[in-house]
Amino acid sequence: MDPEINGNLKPSFTILVADDDPDDRFLLAKAFGELQGFGEIRFVEDGEQLMNYLDRRGEYADPLFYPQAELIFLDLNMPKKNGRQALVEIKAASHLEKIPVIVWSSSISEEDIAFCQGAGADCYRTKPERYGEMVEVVRDLVVKYSFQEGSRIRKTPESALSDATHQKAPPGPLGIKNT
């Protein structure tokens, strides 16, 4: 059995965040930093970098430096290739389709939500306005997707029970929560 950090999450779990906004990346990095032992977080700034990372192209070719993502936080409005295009590509690729994709957007547009649901997003969350809420949402999402079949991340039975008692049920389809 692999060792676990703080009796919780193994460090082999890699979360990839695709977001062009440096302030959003900073806040997410800080929020993930408060979740000790969750694994690694990696950042890309647009949809082209995201797909290059996932397909191990160019600067992202070395899996030692760029491990396979097991969870993706995807902003919709990015340059070069937007999040909608990237989501469609991810869910169409047999080697990527099972990676959970959380659309992490400031958009509350019903059209965006419907598109993402139709394209196969696992969850749609609007970016919280308050930092404390962001930490809570990120924690809940990481815990939720750490239990998915095929995930390399595991929890001890004791910590899983503890976490389950603190989770909120996700509202609506895709766990959509507008804040």
Image: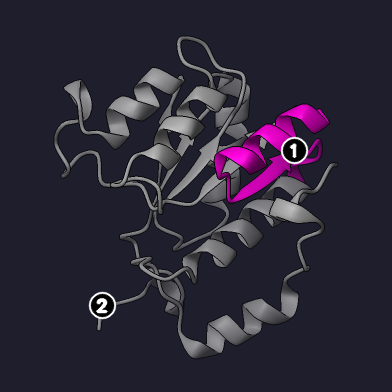
Quarter of the figure with the C terminus: top right
Amino acid residing under circle 2: Asp
Q: Which circle, 2 or 1, is nearer the viewer? A: 1
Q: Where is residue 174 in the image (x, y as percent from the top left)?
A: 69, 52
Q: Does the magenta stretch include residue 41?
A: no
Quarter of the figure with the N terminus: bottom left
- Rate crowding at label 2 as few (under 14), some (14 to 19) or many (20 or more) other CA atoms within 10 Å: few
Spatial separation of the CA atoms under disc 2 and disc 1:
34 Å
Q: What element carries label 2?
A: loop
- Residue drawn at (77%, 39%), measured in percent from left and top? 128
Which of the 4 image quarters holds residue 156? Answer: bottom left
Relative depth, front residue between 142 and 174: 174
> Which residue is label 2 attached to?
2
Q: Is residue 123 magenta?
A: yes
Amino acid residing under circle 1: Thr
- Rate crowding at label 1 as few (under 14), some (14 to 19) or many (20 or more) other CA atoms within 10 Å: some
- Residue drawn at (49%, 71%), measured in percent from left and top? 147
Can you see residue 108? Answer: no
- Residue drawn at (38%, 28%), measured in percent from left and top? 50
Relative depth, front residue between 15 and 78: 78
Q: In this view, does 3 lie above or below 87?
A: below
> Which residue is label 1 attached to?
126
Q: Is mark 1 on a helix, strand or loop?
A: strand
> What residue occupies the far right of the structure in this picture?
179
Please provide the residue range marked out in magenta: 106-132
